Amino acid sequence: MSKFVDRPRYACALGGAIGTLRAIPRAVPIVHGSAGCGGNIANAINAGAGYIGGGYCGGYALPSSNVVERDIVFGGESRLREQIQSSLEIMDGDLFVVVTGCMVDMIGDDTIAIAAEFKNAEKPVIAVPTPSFKGNAFKGYELLFKGLIDKYIQPSSEKEPLSVNVLGIAPVQDVFWKGNLREIKRLLEKLGLKVNTFFGEGETLDNFKRAGQARLNIVASNTVGIDSAKHFEEVHNIPYIVTPFPIGALAGETFLKTVGTALNIDTTRINRVIAEEKKVYYDYMERIADIYNDVDLQRYAVVVGDSGYAPALTRFLSDELGWLTELAVVTDLLDEPQQETVRAQFSGLNSGLHPAVYFDSDASSVKKYLRNLWPPNRNSRYYDALNPAVVVGSSFERDLAQEFGCPLVPVTFPLTGRCVMGRAYAGFTGGISLTEDIITYLVMGR
């Protein structure tokens, strides 16, 4: 029997597709779904992703068929046809993408065929079925990407030797996606690569069109983007590598070496880039050495996040800040092989620590796991308390942090208590930013 999920930590597949389209300038989503789907999703991803707003054509400006009972009974294809036509006339976009809610897929509306009727329109129209019963927001990201691979990215038999695409960082679900992509692109460009991140600063639909020319696809995630990369390889003959999401100097170094080795980049150049980054990184980190040691800022840690962030945060806290991560809860829905892949990322920490790892999306479960791991004091004469400690997770962990009397550092979706603009946690500069935020929460109010 399926488990009831208390306060889901992600949007549905439709929400993931809308969030991804929101990150593409001049791409216009057309929601074919029940009345209210678009508005509910707009509210969820706006607040949950650090108040990102509607973007170029999102939020309450989102075109939607808003099917009602009559359309469900007799079919909503005519309503969709009408909505596409009116959207083409009214909305100023360069790509129109029909994404679907649950109801219209359940009744069998052929959205792909309806979209194909507009093949001679001035602007391209494609359809990508994204009902929520196919998965969560990460699945929506994959479905949309695969649709663009099939119908929008232009085939190219010639590959640019030093051109790469970056996959695996899902806009909105990764609240810091734009800053993270900026940092990853900066690092890869220092290796001499031409980098396409699709959703980064200054990137447009042309980045999708030219993506078939890449020499390599880099999936910066243990789980997300791998299906898209496999499909990329099948359709456009572009191989891929998978590397964990990097936070900090140690993970940044591993990331650069992994990519550099895959592309046969000169080792001297790789090492030079790493040395340059470390010099800057540790110059900044030196600034906190006095306060860290003077007031003993080492902490126990509880980490709650998706399969990209949870291992990366755990490794950073353990191996770079010297913290004692006791519990890590991975919140996305994964099958057993995926869980084993992610679990392996928690092993081999330089600190020698072995945090307890659980896979559970239910917000209320984290408290249960922590109580089982660290039982409460029952008037024991000698009690080893989980103190001082810090919870690194989402806004949902606020109650947990209050109950255990420790600060909460909110860094994963949903983030309703932070405004996020250009912040990044990826790579070397991301490690500096994360340390800055963590120490700020610890010394706040002194």
Image (spheres, rainbow, N blue to C red):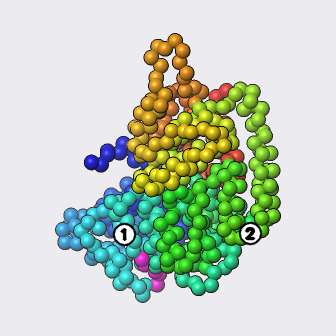
Residue 108 position, x and y percent, is 26, 71
Residue at the spot x=30%, y=62% of the render?
102
**Residue that lies at the very extreme toward the bottom in this rendered image:** 120
> Could you tell me if residue 95 is visible in this image?
no
Q: Does the magenta stretch include residue 441?
A: no
Q: Is residue 125 magenta?
A: yes
Residue 202 position, x and y percent, is 63, 67
Q: Closer to the observer: label 1 or label 2?
A: 2
Residue at the spot x=59%, y=43% of the render?
314
Drawn side of residue 145 relative to residue 32, left or right: right
Residue 440 position, x and y percent, is 66, 36
Residue assigned mark 2: 265
Residue density around tag 2, few if under 14, some if 14–19, many if 20 or more, within 10 Å:
some
In the rendered image, the quadrant that contains the C terminus is: top right
Q: Label 1 to label 2, Cα distance in Å?
A: 40 Å
Q: Which of 140 and 157 is in front in this view?
A: 157
Q: What stretch is highlighted in magenta?
A: 122-126
> Could you tell me if residue 155 is visible in this image?
yes
